[in-house]
Amino acid sequence: MAYLQWTENLSVGVPRMDEHHKKLVDLINQVFDAMSGDAAAAVDSVLADLLDYTRYHFAEEEKLLAACSYPDLEEHQAVHRSMVKEVLDMRSRHLDNPASVTASETLDFLSKWLMRHIIGKDLRYRPYAEPVSGGGAA
Ligand SMILES: [Fe+2]
Ligand SMILES: [Fe+2]
């Protein structure tokens, strides 16, 4: 099974945000691993970790976008909010009935959830955020 991978073409030009995105990729792979096992409690725990880290990353990213006067910040924040809700919904479906959510469906869902956002939305802030970050650890 191919795990989700972060590749250089996903770089938003801000090393700290790239590190956050790599951590999200790692957590998504952990969700897949947990779902490939039998323990529903382990799945819920790693979904909770994914939610916590997602909220942390979104808050930090929004601070960065505010600091570089990104013009589409409000739209970006709205997308972040709906992405959190999508994972919350998935987590409650899993809690209600662990068998209703398979490992490969979940990996597929979370891969698209993250990759579409990085490629479709996060990469757009690169021209604003990269000069401000100075290429170092922001
Ligand atoms: Fe984002
Ligand atoms: Fe992001």
Image: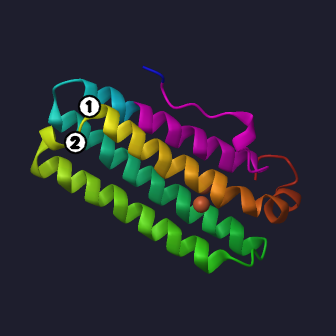
How busy is the neighbourhood of tag 2: few (under 14 within 10 Å), some, or many (20 plus)?
some
Element at label 2? loop
Q: Position of residue 21 (x, y in %)?
A: 59, 45
Image position of 4 with respect to 91: above or below = above
Dividing the picture into quadrants, the one containing residue 69 is: bottom right
- Distance between the Cα atoms at labels 2 and 1? 9 Å
Does the Cβ of the disc 2 residue fall within 8 Å of ligand 2?
Answer: no
| Colour basis | rainbow
In the image, the segment drawn in magenta is 3-29
- The type of residue carrying mark 1 is Met
Ligand 1 rendered quadrant = bottom right
- The type of residue carrying mark 2 is Val
Q: Which residue is mark 1?
A: 35
Tell how many labels: 2
Magenta-drawn stretch contains 117: no
How busy is the neighbourhood of tag 1: few (under 14 within 10 Å), some, or many (20 plus)?
many
Quarter that holds the N terminus:
top left
Element at label 1? helix
Main secondary structure along the magenta-highlighted residues: helix
Contact between labelled residues 1 and 2, with CB atoms less than 8 Å apart? yes
Residue drawn at (57%, 56%) of the image = 117
Residue drawn at (67%, 44%) of the image = 18
Residue drawn at (59%, 77%) of the image = 75
Q: Nearer the observer, disc 2 or disc 1?
A: 2
Q: Which residue is mark 2?
A: 101
Magenta-drawn stretch contains 22: yes
Residue drawn at (29%, 33%) of the image = 103
Instruction: Work out which residue is located at the far left of the displayed protein and give it.
Output: 97
Q: Position of residue 60 (x, y in %)?
A: 60, 61
Q: Position of residue 95 (x, y in %)?
A: 15, 49
Does the Cβ of the disc 1 residue fall within 8 Å of ligand 2?
Answer: no
Q: Which mark is residue 81?
A: none
